[in-house]
Image (cartoon, grey):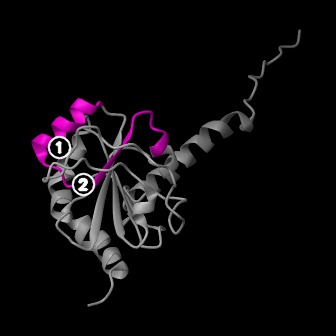
Amino acid sequence: MSSRVEKKPRAAWFVYVPALAFFVLVGVFALMLTQEGRDASALPSALLGRDAPQIVLPPLEGLKDTNGTALAGLDPAAFAGNITLVNVWASWCAPCREEHPYLTKLSQDSRVQLIGLNYKDKTANALKFLGNYGNPYDAVGVDNNGRGAIDWGVYGVPETFLVGPDGKIRFKFAGPLNPEIIEKQLMPEIDKLAPAG
């Protein structure tokens, strides 16, 4: 009587390929996120160097300047011949509160007009926010349904775009502005666009 030794079936090597591929991808993503000098907030924008979106947004109803005049909405016609910062914000956005003092300071730079894009917000809440923290904006467009933000390629709030006098987007920053970003990234771009003298 012959004794048969049963062989255990060997798993084919290709069974392990998906797991191996997963770990390789995780390693690549981890490396990209931890690269020295890489700014996680510097998200790419297909709009850089292109004309700013030509979407017109209505004004924030009830928002007035210090003279009691109603402020305009977002109108791309206002970009022509001006250096413009378009800031996407909302009253429900905690990081928007963090950056607000820096926007207020930027609004004092006579070379720049500051336009707000109020994203998916309630009018009363937006007015209360600006009433509590101050209004740095020369105009505020209301984007109730988020369509305007889509056209601008917004990832989330806050985001800020620098539009040159030619109407082209020159700079984009995703996240709350802070003194370092303003000094090292934004102001050099504004200085490039501002006429000398």
Magenta highlight range: 122-148
- Residue 49 in picture, x, y percent from top left: 52, 69
The amino acid marked with disc number 1 is: Leu
Q: Nearer the viewer, residue 8 or 94?
A: 94
Q: Is residue 12 left or right of residue 90?
A: right
Q: Nearer the viewer, residue 66 or 52?
A: 66
* Cα–Cα span, label 2 and label 1: 9 Å
The N terminus, quarter of image: top right
The disc at residue 168 is none
Q: Is residue 113 left or right of residue 101?
A: right
In percent of the image, x 35 and y 75: which residue is there?
189
CB within 8 Å, label 2 to label 1: yes
- Residue 16 in picture, x, y percent from top left: 66, 36
In percent of the image, x 60 and y 37: which residue is there?
19
Q: Is residue 15 left or right of residue 171?
A: right
Callout 1: SS: helix
The verdict on residue 144 being magenta is: yes
